[in-house]
Amino acid sequence: MFSRARITMMQQLRVAVVGAGAAGLCAARHILARPDTFAPPVVYELTEHVGGTWFYEERTGSYDNGLPIHSSMYRNLRTNLPKEVMMFPDFPFDSQLPSFLPHEEVQRYLERYCQCHLITPHIRFSTVVEEVRPITEETEKGVMTTWEVTSQDKSGSQETQTFDSVFICSGHYSDPYIPSIPGIERFKGKVIHSHSYRHPEPFSGQSVVVLGAGASGLDISLELGRSNAQVTLSHGKPTLPFPLPYGIHQATPVVEVQEDGSLRFQDGAITQAQVLMLCTGYKFSYPFLKPAQLGLEIHDHLVTPLYKFLMPPAFPSLFIIGICKMICPFQQFHCQTQFSLAVLEGSVTLPSQAEMEEEAVKEMERKVEWGVKPRNMLKMDKDQWSYARTLAQMGKFPPLTPVTQSLYEEVWRQKQAHPQIYRHVNYRLVSDTQWEQQDRQAGE
Ligand code: FAD
């Protein structure tokens, strides 16, 4: 069992962080706050900037170095969580801002977080991590694991550096999930994934079938409708959260592209379209990991087994931050990071590898029994609060304040009841347990 942290407490532990989005910045901030235990981290970032998802890229396709564009942000996106619960618990947004923000404000917030915590000097920009490899060694004190991280910088020069721990903060909204649609090669129009959607203007006047009615599918359908596209929203949901305006039609899922290039829907209806917009989500992708080496299975929508949705039981010095969905991401990164650092510091007593594996496997088995599909297994929703409490108890750090949960739940109710206008409201945190509604903005 890994126990390098305890064994080498007198030396500073060396930590690599893959990615300088919100999760990577959070990891770096907390590592830098513990100089007695940790050396300053090495943060690898493949782009030239921090922010990850929140850095809006007008470009689509690839960067100059041939790597695929990371961010899936579109121009008109506004946050679906108010800043009062979206923030890192120890770093509020500017109080003058409205609750629901355009993406530029989140990017500015992350840049300010980075500056305030003096993280920038520790980031290696334009440097892609190509491999993260465990090196295990039998010693008289037990099995010791270190990590070799191989990276390549802009000039093409490769380097391998050794660390005691690695935080994987590379995000999971970048690699499009493309469903298999029989005959798709016969489609005569343009097929585009929401990852490469930026704004509606290019689609004005065109007939667009949007496949998928998740957050992006709904948002993009509405934008396209307002821009005079003829939109058909194709999805498998029994009902949508709100009636569709602007003449947007609904259809059952696309099941086939016919000989003549037309789209056939599940109920037999047929349509010709100029664009098929896939709002079908993203898959987990860690090209720099060898899953079998780590005792992991990485599927499109599931990574397993992970103890506490964080670490492979066989290698509890590797932490995958932020893998869960339907959460308050920044708040969860904050908790997971502190828990992971407590593990490395040796202040959390981990169960044995077999016990961690059993817990992770049982969690998944329970979900299978409840009928949860593999693609939804990492959706946390209501469970995120008890999860965060458990991490805080085990890691001995302050838990999230109750106001976070109550405001999150209120916003969720508002979203269900008034899906088109829930973002018009502003909130204010009054205390650790109370929030109040401040005012209502005029229209979006
Ligand atoms: P990312 O932001 O994706 O950052 C990962 C970083 O890792 C990137 O900078 C990337 O360049 C880098 N990287 C990746 N691979 C490598 C490598 N091999 N080597 C070096 N660097 C690498 N969340 C909310 O809280 N509210 C919202 O309203 C909201 N809206 C969203 C809308 C969209 C369209 C999307 C896609 C996501 C949204 N999210 C929202 C979720 C959002 O992803 C999280 O808030 C958060 O930004 C994720 O941070 P991250 O650091 O985990 O990943």
Image: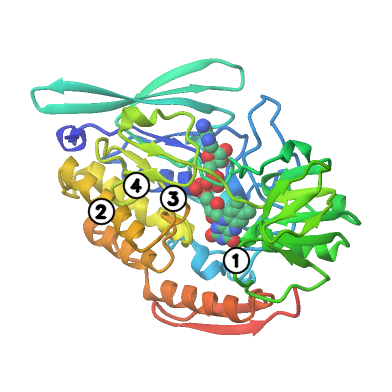
- Rendering coords of residue 438 (x, y %): 60, 83
Q: Nearer the viewer, mark 2 or mark 4?
A: 2
Q: Is residue 109 visible?
A: no
* Mark sitting earlier along the chain (1/4): 1
Give left or right: position of 418 versus 188: left
Residue type, mark 1 in image: Lys
Position of residue 265 measured from the top left corner of the image (x, y, whole percent):
71, 56
Name the residue that disc number 4 marks: 310
Task: Give the alpha-carbon distance from disc 4 to disc 3, as whole Å.
Answer: 8 Å
Ranked by sequence position, the earlier of labels 4 and 3 is 4
Return the residue at label 3: 322
Contact, mark 4 vs mark 3 (Cβ under 8 Å): no
Q: Nearer the viewer, mark 2 or mark 1?
A: 1
What residue sits right under mark 1 in the picture?
Answer: 237
The residue beneath circle 2 is 362
**Picture quarter with the N terminus:** top left
Which amino acid, by three-letter code, is at mark 4?
Leu
Q: Is residue 256 visible?
A: yes
Query: In terms of secondary structure, where does tag 4 sit?
Result: loop
Marks 2 and 1 sit apart, C-alpha to C-alpha, by 29 Å
